[in-house]
Image (spheres, coloured by chain):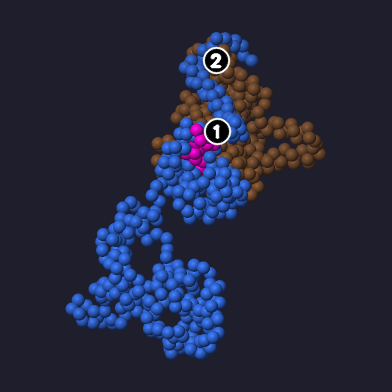
Amino acid sequence: MKKYPAIKIKDGKKYFFRFDLDTRVQHIILAATVIILVLTGMPLKFSDTTWAPYLYSVFGGSQMAPTIHKWTGALMLILFVYHVIRVVSGIITNHILPLKREGKMSVGRVTMILLKLPMIPNLKDVKDFFGLMKYLLYFTNEHPHGDEWTWKEKFDYWAPFWGMFVIGITGLIIWNKVIATQIIPGEFINLCLIAHSDEALLAALFLFIWHWYNVHFSTSVFPMGTVFLTGYLSEDLMVEEHYEHYVKVMTKEGLEGEIKPPHGGGNNPTTCGEPETDEPDSPPETTATEAPNNSTQQGGISS
Amino acid sequence: MSLKSRSGPLGYLGIFVLLSIYFLPTGAQGSDVGNCLLCHKYPGLSRVDENAEMRLLYVNEEIFNKSVHAKVKCEGCHTDIKKIPHEPVKPVDCLVLCHIIEPSEEQKFSHKSVETFLADSVHGKKDETGKEKPFSEDMPTCKDCHDNPLFRPLAFVKKVRPGVAEDALGRCRVCHKKEEFIYRFYNHITTRLHKSRSPLNIAQSCGRCHDDPDLVARHNLSTMAGGSYGETFHGKAANLLDESVPDCLDCHVPKGQSVHQMHGNDDLRATTHPENRGQICGSVDCHPGASPQFANYQVHPEFDKEQEPVTYWFTTFFIVLTGGTLLPLMAILFLDLLRRLFPNASFRRRKEKR
């Protein structure tokens, strides 16, 4: 597996490793399939609106759009299966097998490993969530110091995960209704249709409002965050969202001297309410490490 | 072996004829008034002719009866056959006067006029001056191009659009002479072969009564039929102007009967009676191979707590889930926008570094 440096420096700015190529490609396929599925599916859900026939005809109308929808859905399901296989095999090779080799296999240890996986919500997420509420309601000027993966990212991961599962299964049933009803009662098709379209609407609204706000429209990233393309996050955003992890990585890379203060200037009372103008004096950037660092080679979210 | 030798003693033949008529399936007689199929129905019936070519003399009655000449008596074309058993026959001349009466002029019918058209065409044997063209023997005659075509569904009009199709009228004019007759019968027949309304149009016209809440309540009907149809894939595709989806009539009218012969769901004759539903859904044009369970799909789902509690609570769950997920997130998003106006303001401040 390709090793990614934890910090890359370009034009004197630091960029922090977030997603490996595999994860980025998965994300792009997911994004493309979601958009096509929404565009070919929503005209059906809202078939009695005036815009629906026009949008539907862009995709070839009822002759073509259903075919596009089904095969795009199939591609998304293949992606889902691929992702699950990647995650599970990652857990087995990186955690379970070493444990087995050491002869330390036990239910407790395996449970602990599973609970400590990057995408599993933990107490810190609860704390950060309430911290964010306090911050948003002006009770503090200190943004929560997020870890490598914040509750927002975990939410953005599990919402589509559940969505793809529900929409995928019900979609497959509706697609193959004649075969499916050899086993399940016909009334289930009605329920599948409700689940498929309602969950899809939820997913679409979730992604196009919440996710796009966070990665496109928020003033921190506008017009577009680039981490989904480059895999590396800028230092400013790292400080804003992942301060705890930022400090860890900087320390590990031997750059303690260059650590910026947290977002909102929380630990620097004198600068409160004023724009942050003071850049810490940084030594020449050549000190930044290019050495591979195993501890941060997490392979994005799939390990 | 000649055909003559097969005729045998007339006594046997008589018995055979009587038995054949007795066992002949009803409706399959076609136009075989002369009972030619008595012999010609046997698949192996053939002979080797003078040119040492095998001639198959078998007539497949089932296929013949679906052909455009099904109503013409055998003798109508094989005019030289006057008695049975018959002598070897001459090839059929398509231009003979046929026994059929052409309805617009009430004259005996013939393809003779086609000969005139053909003679005047690029395929005519003579040129404009009346001189025989070189190699005129290569010019086609009727049977070089035509077999005995089978009736087919309306498909020769390449682009279906409203109005009279001139390509179709050209075909009418080959046989029928009176323009007024041609237009009237063309319209009479083709309007019956096309759907005159789109599925959406049909659903809307049924919905004029069946979506009227007062009427539905008065007659104690279980559904607002047009509305609930619109909740299924059938109705949604109809909304998007799909012409191929089933509309009200496709399911509620028994196959092969008129739209006036609909029955209530509790009537055993009704296609939508629980015992018959499977056949309608599983019809060859819709969901072939569908199990009877398939037909339990609710084609008229109602969002009603009493009537369909499962659907009701299932839908409610997703409404709550959608609201419960999106509203808090949108609240956070809104607060986030407000927070960005004054990034460093706060009611309380942290004084110390952790």
* Front residue (pair A171, B143): B143
What's the residue at 40%, 68% (across, down)?
B68
Q: Quadrant of the C terminus of chain B?
A: top right
Q: Is residue A217 left or right of residue B350?
A: left
Q: Identify the residue under disc 1.
A: B303
Q: Identify the residue under disc 2.
A: A137
Residue B294 visible within the image: no
The secondary element bearing badge 2 is classed as loop
Depth-wise, is mark 1 or mark 2 nearer the camera?
1
Q: Which mark is residue B340?
A: none
Which quadrant of the view contains residue B348? top right
Q: Position of residue B216 (x, y in %)?
A: 49, 34
Numbered disc total: 2
Q: Is residue B181 left or right of residue A18?
A: left
Q: Residues within 10 Å of mark 1 (few under 14, many from 20)?
A: some
Chain that the image shows in blue: B
What's the residue at 44%, 37% (across, down)?
B209
Q: Which residues are magenta?
A: B218-233
* Mark 2 chain: A
Q: Position of residue A180 (x, y in %)?
A: 62, 47
- Asked if residue B220 lies in the magenta stretch, the reply is yes
Chain that the image shows in brown: A
Question: Distance of mark 1 from mark 2, alpha carbons?
Answer: 40 Å
What's the residue at 50%, 83% (across, down)?
B46
Q: Position of residue B97 (x, y in %)?
A: 32, 76
In this view, the residue farthest toward the right is: A103
Q: On screen, B322 above or below A263?
A: below
Instruction: Look at label 1 and name its amino acid.
Output: Phe
- Asked if residue A280 lies in the magenta stretch, the reply is no
Q: Position of residue A246 (x, y in %)?
A: 60, 26
